[in-house]
Amino acid sequence: MNRGDGDGFARCAQGHTHWGRFGAAGLLAHHDGRVLLQHRAKMTIGGGTWGVFGGARHSAEDPVTAALREAAEESTLDISRVTVHGLVHDDHGNWAYDTVVGTVPQLLDVRPASWETRDAAWAPVDEVEGYDLFPAFANTWPRLRRCLRRPVLVVDAANVMGSRADGWWRDRAGAAARLRDQVARLERVADMGPFDLAYPEKILVVEGKARDIGPGRDNGDSVRVVSAPHEGDDTIVDTVASTTGPDVLCVVVTADRELRRRVIAKGAEVTGPRWLLNQLEDRVASS
């Protein structure tokens, strides 16, 4: 394994010593009710316990890159098969650990690939707590378990447009197209359900005079535009009903009280337009 500039110990604001000068990251891959765990070699920190493949971040690495790199260094997992859905950020002050959560299309054959790994196993989710877990992973596991779902974001375009003063009442189709393009460029969102950062599938439901805006020229598959043939609320409810399930976290963006009640009854979670608008404004400010 190549040593990076992040290798080394750091002391957090809580007075604890951690591995990773710039923090650390790990990968929690899952498929069909099982999660990929690493049995740590005896000579490692927490040797003999089970946790996720991970390690120190390099100074120029983002958490996703670091987690995938560490998994590839410590196991035979083909990281090109991993679809990242989000991460959980455990901040200790001056040091943090990011657990990156993603799915694989099947239970891949994963074996040790470095001295740090004693074994690898696809553990049933309901049996994870029965393993001798690395303490930090054991503490985070209850929250991580809630993240074993694919995030889907459904946007009530008319309601979001109505919450911002950008002249939408003069040109509803134009305002909807602007919102579509802004949502398409939003690769990730903060504080979506149990995720500190999520990379959701994005669905924009449009109605009325905005019904024919289409997907846009440059959006590709970044956002799916659903045109409501009649009432937009009914289409949103139908979209949620066809999307929700035990392996999906569906969040609807709307402030409409009746619509909120209806989609919650279908298993979705709800957040208001201001949450989405803050995400869009933060993206513009950082670009």
Image (cartoon, rainbow, N blue to C red):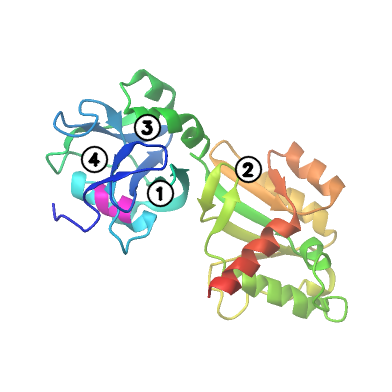
Q: Which of these two is toward me, 122 or 147?
A: 147
Q: In screen coordinates, is 81 left or right of 175?
A: left
The residue under label 2 is which amino acid type? Thr
Q: Nearer the viewer, mark 4 or mark 1?
A: 1
- Residue 120, percent across and down? 23, 34
Q: Would you say the residues marked 4 and 2 are in contact, meaning their CB atoms lie under 8 Å apart?
A: no
Say which mark, if any, is on residue 73: none
Distance from Cα at disc 4 to Cα at disc 1: 37 Å
Q: Position of residue 234 (x, y in %)?
A: 81, 52
Q: How far apart in space, not on screen, are marks 3 and 4 (Cα)?
A: 26 Å
- Crowding around mark 2 (Cα neighbors within 10 Å: few <14, some 14 to 19, many 20+) is some
Residues 137 and 266: in front is 137
- Name the residue that disc number 1 marks: 94
Q: Residue at x 15, y 28 (%)?
A: 42
* Alpha carbon distance from label 2 to label 1: 38 Å
| Mark 3 lies on residue | 136
Q: Nearer the viewer, residue 69 or 84?
A: 69
Q: Residues within 10 Å of mark 4 (few under 14, many from 20)?
A: few
Alpha-carbon distance for marks 2 and 3?
31 Å
The amino acid type of the residue labelled 3 equals Ala
SS class, disc 1: loop
Q: Is residue 213 left or right of residue 69?
A: right
**In the image, is residue 230 above or below residue 124?**
below
- Depth check, mark 2 against mark 3: the one in front is 3
The numbered mark at residue 244 is 2
Of circles 2 and 1, the one toward us is: 1
Residue 46 higher or lower than 98, as above or below: above
Image quadrant where residue 33 sits: top left
Give the secondary structure at mark 3: helix
**Residue, disc 4:** 109
